């Protein structure tokens, strides 16, 4: 082999080695990024599972009380703001694009009609109708210390409290301020009340998705969230009254959704509406809807957030925990969640791949943001036929 041939062969070998080395480095960078991509996908799955499970159950109500049936017959089980002891509505906030609250009664024995209630300030003593069956008439079953319970009445007033004592048919609950007296005509039942919202982590300032239990605890669900947005779709038709029950008919709601109005010319002194009226019906030759017809289609239509802040207000405009009657229309919820990789060195410039830019300049080392869009139609929010 001549010297020239040796030089050519060495050059080719060096070129092939350089290419192979470059490919190996790029493959190594891509390999290092894949676990982070898998972690982001796992985080979106965890969040989607938690939110989807609660939304699917939203509105489930008690089954063996005087106010049995879906909660949407009384108040909105889904709301676009934080609910609970730290309640946005009490502060005048009725819509947040990055929050959704869900209320439902799980499959439980802990549900009973309220006979009497005595407010002791931060606590409430509640005498309940026995619910243990025909052989036990002196106590209630299912309620335990530490249980979260829902108190609500036919007008759409509701509160969430915590059981602190059970003695026979009397239950003591702790609350952060009640919006009603609940002395007869109301129901108490075990409840799941959750708010999912985005908030900055105290230590890092990066957004977290957290779950608030309506009382004291906010628990992180996932970290490194860059976008959490909730949209709502609702019944385009206003609430309407249903024909009176005939003899032998099974019990059902008096309206397609929302609280039933008082009888014609009967005035409920507990609200500011006139005789025969409430927040969803006005009395003019019979109950007429207050809400507008949004479209001719029966399918859910997008709900403008402005409609959640303009009334009519339930139970009325003076109530401390009032809500907009349009919330009763909600039938479908769409959640958009986007997460980012925690390591800034795996994020490139801000753009389509990255909501928040990082320091990486090598495409093989990119771990792009992951996004999930979740559409849920809660099975307990459908209007009555």
Image (cartoon, rainbow, N blue to C red):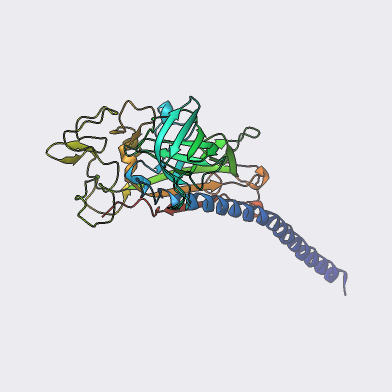
Q: Where is residue 139 in the image (x, y as percent from the top left)?
A: 48, 44
Q: How many marks?
A: 0
Q: Nearer the viewer, residue 179 or 337?
A: 179
Q: Position of residue 187 (x, y in %)?
A: 40, 41
Residue that extends furthest to the bottom in the rendered view of this protein: 1
Q: At 76% from the left edge and 65% from the top edge, which residue is drawn?
A: 16
Q: Which of 136 and 51 is in front in this view?
A: 136
Where, by quadrant of the figure, is residue 8 drawn? bottom right
> Would you say residue 291 is visible in this rendering?
yes
The answer to whether residue 63 is left or right of residue 280 is: right
**Does residue 122 sit above or below 293 in this rendering?**
above
Q: Position of residue 254 (x, y in %)?
A: 25, 47
Where, by quadrant of the figure, is residue 329 drawn? top left
> Would you say residue 97 is visible in this rendering?
no
The answer to whether residue 77 is left or right of residue 226 is: left
Q: Nearer the viewer, residue 134 or 210?
A: 134
Quarter of the N terminus within the rendering = bottom right
Q: At 66% from the left edge and 50% from the top edge, which residue is drawn?
A: 362
Quarter of the C terminus within the rendering = bottom left
Q: Where is residue 24 in the image (x, y as percent from the top left)?
A: 74, 61
Q: Nearer the viewer, residue 3 or 18?
A: 18
**Does residue 257 sit above or below 96 in this rendering?**
below
**Does residue 160 sit above or below 108 in this rendering?**
above
């Amino acid at each position: 082999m001549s010297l020239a041939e040796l030089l050519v062969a060495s050059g080719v070998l060096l070129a092939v080695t350089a290419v192979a080395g470059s490919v190996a480095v790029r493959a190594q960078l891509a390999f290092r990024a894949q676990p982070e991509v898998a972690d982001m996908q796992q985080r979106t799955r965890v969040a989607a599972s938690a939110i989807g499970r609660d939304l699917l159950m939203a509105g489930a109500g008690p089954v063996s009380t005087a106010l049995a049936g879906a909660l949407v017959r009384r108040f909105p089980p889904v709301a676009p703001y934080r609910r609970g002891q730290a309640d946005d509505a009490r502060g005048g906030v009725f819509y947040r694009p990055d929050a959704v609250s869900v209320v439902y009664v799980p499959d439980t024995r802990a549900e009973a009609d309220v006979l009497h209630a005595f407010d002791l300030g931060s606590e409430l003593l509640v005498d309940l109708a026995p619910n243990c069956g025909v052989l036990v008439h002196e106590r209630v079953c299912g309620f335990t210390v530490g249980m979260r319970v829902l108190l609500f009445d036919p007008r759409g007033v509701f509160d969430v409290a915590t059981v602190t004592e059970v003695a026979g048919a009397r239950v003591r609950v702790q609350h952060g301020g009640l919006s009603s007296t609940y002395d007869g005509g109301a129901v108490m039942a075990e409840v799941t009340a959750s708010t999912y919202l985005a908030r900055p982590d105290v230590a890092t300032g990066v957004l977290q998705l957290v779950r608030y239990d309506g009382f004291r605890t906010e628990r992180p669900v996932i970290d490194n969230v860059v976008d959490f947005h909730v949209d709502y779709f609702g019944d385009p038709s206003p609430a309407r009254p249903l024909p009176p029950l005939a003899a032998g008919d099974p019990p059902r709601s008096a309206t397609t959704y929302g609280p039933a109005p008082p009888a014609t010319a009967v005035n409920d002194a507990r609200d500011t509406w006139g005789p025969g009226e409430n927040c969803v019906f006005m009395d003019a030759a019979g109950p007429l809807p207050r809400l507008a017809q949004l479209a001719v289609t029966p399918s859910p239509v997008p709900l403008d957030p402005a409609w959640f802040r303009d009334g009519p207000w339930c139970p009325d405009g003076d109530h401390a925990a009032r809500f907009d009657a349009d919330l009763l229309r909600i039938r479908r919820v769409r959640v958009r969640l986007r997460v980012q990789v925690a390591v800034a060195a795996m994020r490139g410039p801000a753009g389509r791949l990255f909501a928040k830019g990082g320091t990486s300049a090598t495409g093989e080392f990119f771990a792009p943001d992951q996004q999930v869009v979740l559409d849920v139609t809660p099975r307990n929010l459908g209007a009555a036929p």
